Amino acid sequence: MVAVLAATLVVGAAVQGLVGLGVNMVSAPVVALLEPRLVPGMLLFMGLATPLVMLARDHHDIDWRGLAWSLPMRIPGTLVGLFLVATVNERWLGVTVAVVVLLSVVVTIRSVELPLNRFTLASAGITSGITATATSIGGPPIAVLYQHRPAAEIRSTLAVYFVGGAVFSLVGLGASGQLTVADVGIAALMLPALVLGVFLARLLRGHLPSDSIRGGVLVVCAASAILLLVRSVA
């Protein structure tokens, strides 16, 4: 199981290093299949660590204005997400993870272009807080707004957003007793996989067309989510 998790996280971190998000979209369905008890806690630690590694180098072109409207709204969203974690059993949490990923894939494929303003940023922040805390997948709502911005701005802005958002969700889960020692231990064990993934992304940057990368990610995410959905329902 550890080897599969590590390989999945290498791929997810590499994807996030290339397009700005992906570590939990790729990893959440696989982790939920292998060990549901690690969702969302362990993956939120991964969602915190990956952008920190990225920001060590990619800390330019950050849209601080957009973050000022979206990031604080993670707090009310986190509270709703905590309620879901406390009340939804593992089976339905698996269904929720699968549905969130599939909806994210559909939205990304359609390339919906939304205006980047106070209302959309705040709405995305709330939605992201709910889905991140409940399923560990909080990137798509905010990424949809930024998907047509320059690549460097997407990567750096989303990295800051993911760091702040993961802190909110982890504090909430810790305060409500939803984090375990296993979450922390396995997250620490998986850190080298994240570093390797980000390093691979830097090597691949400029050599692979972003469209082909995104297409491959969507196929993997959709296949994993469908498999998780079938298993959870069955």
Image (cartoon, grey):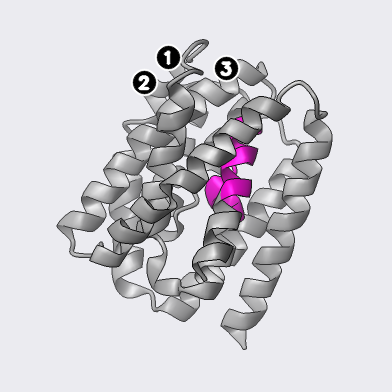
Q: Are marks 2 and 1 in contact (CB under 8 Å)?
A: yes
From the image, tell me which residue sits under label 3. Answer: 153
Q: Is residue 195 visible?
A: yes
Q: Amino acid at mark 1?
A: Arg
Q: Residues within 10 Å of mark 1 (few under 14, many from 20)?
A: few
How far across and how far down the image is residue 8, in percent? 59, 56
Q: Nearer the viewer, residue 84 or 38?
A: 38
From the image, tell me which residue sits under label 1. Answer: 65
How far across and how far down the image is residue 146, in percent? 60, 26
Q: Nearer the viewer, residue 99 or 155?
A: 155
Q: Is residue 138 visible?
A: no
Query: What's the distance in space between the residues labelled 2 and 1, CA to CA?
Result: 5 Å
Residue 11 higher or lower than 152, as above or below: below
| Residue 226 shown left or right of residue 45 in the figure | right
Q: Could you tell me which secondary element the residue under label 1 belongs to?
A: helix
How far across and how far down the image is residue 126, in percent? 40, 42
Q: Earlier in the sequence, mark 2 or mark 3?
A: 2
Q: Residue furthest left?
A: 175
Which of pointers 2 and 3 indicates the residue nearer the eye? 3
Q: Residue at x 58, y 47 (%)?
A: 10
Q: Earlier in the sequence, mark 3 or mark 1?
A: 1
Rendered image: mark on residue 39: none
Q: Amino acid at mark 3?
A: Glu
Q: Could you tell me which secondary element the residue under label 3 belongs to?
A: helix
Look at the image and give the residue range highlighted in magenta.
Answer: 10-26
| Residue 73 shown left or right of residue 92 in the figure | left
From the image, tell me which residue sits under label 2. Answer: 68
Residue 13: say if magenta: yes
Query: What's the distance in space between the residues labelled 2 and 3, CA to CA?
Result: 15 Å
Q: Residue at x 49, y 27 (%)?
A: 54
Q: Residue at x 33, y 55 (%)?
A: 80
